[in-house]
Image (spheres, helix red, strand yellow):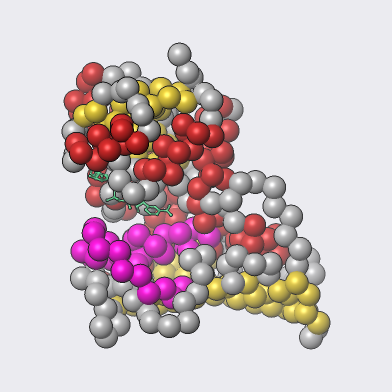
Amino acid sequence: MKKYQIMLVGCGGMGHAWADYVLKERTDCEIIALVDIIPEHAQNYKNEYKLECPIYDHIDKALAAEKPTLIIDTTTPDAHNEIRTKSLLRKIPVIGEKPLADSIDAGRDIVKTADMMNTPHAVMQNRRWIGAMRKMHELAHDERLGRVGFLMSQFFIEVHFGGFRDLMDNPLILDMAVHTFDQARMILGSDPVSVYCTEFNLPGSWYKGNASAVCVYEFENGAIYTYTGSWSSKGFNTSWEADWRMICENGTVMCDGNNAPTVEINGKRTTEEIVYTQKTGHYGCFDEMFEALENQRPAETDCHDNIKTLGMVFGAIESAKTGKKIIL
Ligand SMILES: NC(=O)c1ccc[n+]([C@@H]2O[C@H](COP(=O)([O-])OP(=O)(O)OC[C@H]3O[C@@H](n4cnc5c(N)ncnc54)[C@H](O)[C@@H]3O)[C@@H](O)[C@H]2O)c1
């Protein structure tokens, strides 16, 4: 019997990356049950991955019948609280997609349950595992540049998803900016203390909820971080990792999110070399989550840390609603 007896909950688009990783990249995992409220989705996975396991249309039925040693939650954000809390209450470790939860209270409940049951939960934040982003973190702590005063990200993509994102209240901030905010925390190695945000829709937007936003954060280390972004902006798209400018005491760093950052100090520009040995994106975060489970230590994106990224999301949403600066 393999070490990780996995119940995969949520057999939609993103679940494929998780099933591919555990079935094709690892030798210590097997999927013992598939769960989806739309049973055809689970059946499609069963066929595609040639699995023998049972399928369930509800987490309760699956938990009553099966004894997984690990649960993967790749459901839509509205289901994360239920899936993660129920799994943790049975003392089963959970790893799952971002966002941690679809409200800050739900996120805090998950963290509380993880504490109470002394059981880990870590969240996918794949956009930390990009060589250029790790290099930005190094540069934010590089003596040549000195202290960071101002970090800016610009995220502009025209994307037509269809499905749950078109109907969400805050599609950009909750479903996408959660990545960029998490990248900002990782780059600065610091946590935010306040936020002011304006959320809106551009003329011609096809999203029901606001798909554009401007946010200003103050960080514990004194840096100001600004986020500007849109999921319905036409032309001159940025990368999904965003365009970054970081202004430090002695110079400025520019990065398009993927390629080696360029530094300018005293009028002299250099392109920095990236030395990055981990896997990129999802696979980098998967490796980290499993290594953390193996070593019984919190993963880099453990829920206790990730709640701070979620705090940036819901602080921004509250600020946009109230028109006030929010203390985080
Ligand atoms: N990390 C990334 O880059 C990235 C990219 C895309 C999506 N995601 C995240 O992945 C998650 C899933 O997104 P998706 O695009 O795969 O969505 P999707 O709609 O394609 O798949 C979600 C699946 O979950 C199922 N589901 C919903 N509620 C359920 C419940 N209560 N119990 C069991 N199954 C349930 C749905 O029927 C569906 O099959 C979301 O949280 C999303 O934000 C992350």
Residue 305 in view (yes/no)? no
Q: Position of residue 208 (x, y in %)?
A: 20, 71
| Residue under the point 20% across and 39% down | 40
| Residue under the point 48% across and 19% down | 3
The part of the image, by quadrant, that contains residue 251 is: bottom right
The part of the image, by quadrant, that contains residue 186 is: bottom right
Seen in the image, is 111 located left or right of residue 132? left
Q: Nearer the viewer, residue 275 or 305?
A: 275
The part of the image, by quadrant, that contains residue 264 is: bottom right
| Residue under the point 70% across and 65% down | 139
State whether residue 27 is above or below residue 238.
above
**Residue 272 painted magenta:** no
State whether residue 118 is above or below residue 3.
below
The quadrant of the rendering that contains the C terminus is bottom left
Q: Nearer the viewer, residue 324 or 305?
A: 305
State whether residue 128 is above or below residue 271.
above
Residue 78 in view (yes/no)? yes
Q: Nearer the viewer, residue 69 or 20?
A: 20
Seen in the image, is 228 located left or right of residue 58? right
Residue projecting furthest to the top: 1
Q: Position of residue 47 (x, y in %)?
A: 31, 33
| Numbered label tally | 0
Q: Position of residue 58 (x, y in %)?
A: 19, 33
The quadrant of the rendering that contains the N terminus is top left
Seen in the image, is 139 located left or right of residue 169? right
**Residue 180 painted magenta:** yes
Q: Which segment is the magenta one?
A: 155-183
| Residue under the point 28% across and 49% down | 76
